[in-house]
Image (cartoon, helix red, strand yellow):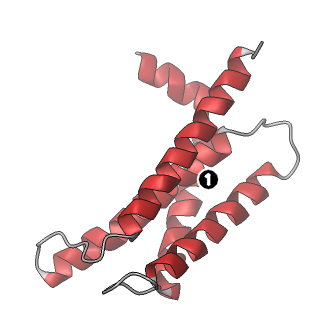
Amino acid sequence: MLHKRQLYQLLFLLAAALWGGLIFYLSSIPDLSSGLSSTYDFVLRKGAHVFVFMVLTYLIASSFDKKERYYLLFVIIAAVVYALIDELHQSFIVSRYGSARDVVIDSVGIYLGIWLYKFFPPDKMIKFLKK
């Protein structure tokens, strides 16, 4: 039988996998555009990179037991590797290209995801959402 904490960890892991799938799906859309002017579209796209990787990182970190040593380093490495894989994947999509700059932008989201996790860990976030 799973303890409540283990169940939450499993749910966060499932949410991270689904979120990663959403990122992969969005990366496979050939002409993903907001329809805004090029400047606003650029800002929106890069903001989306930061946001989706912040959420992914938070979900991955939340799926770990805090007692494990170096788990946040693993989370950071896993998220950066996923960002690299995502950019590689985009390079095979018509009218898309992979970009090292986007990996750097994704890394800002990864940093924010770790920050969010450290200041609002899952137990606090769950209590906040239950209110």
* Quarter-of-image position of residue 59: top right
Query: Is 16 left, or right, of 69 in this rendering?
Result: left
Left or right side of 63 for 49: left
Residue 114 placed where, x, y %? 61, 53
Can you identify the residue that label 1 sits on? 114
Q: Residue 13: image x %, image y %?
A: 63, 40
Q: What x and y, as percent, mark residue 28?
A: 38, 70
In the displayed structure image, the side of residue 20 where residue 45 appears, left or right: left
The extreme top residue here reads: 1
Q: In the rendered view, would you say 58 is above or below 87? A: above
Residue 40 appears anywhere in the view: yes
Give the structural element (helix, strand or loop) at label 1: helix
* In this rendering, position of residue 52 left or right of residue 120: left
Quick check: can you spot residue 120? no
Q: Nearer the viewer, residue 94 or 122?
A: 94
Quadrant containing the C terminus in the rendered view: top left
Identify the residue at image location x=30%, y=87%: 95
Q: Residue at x 41, y 87 (%)?
A: 97
Quadrant the N terminus occupies: top right
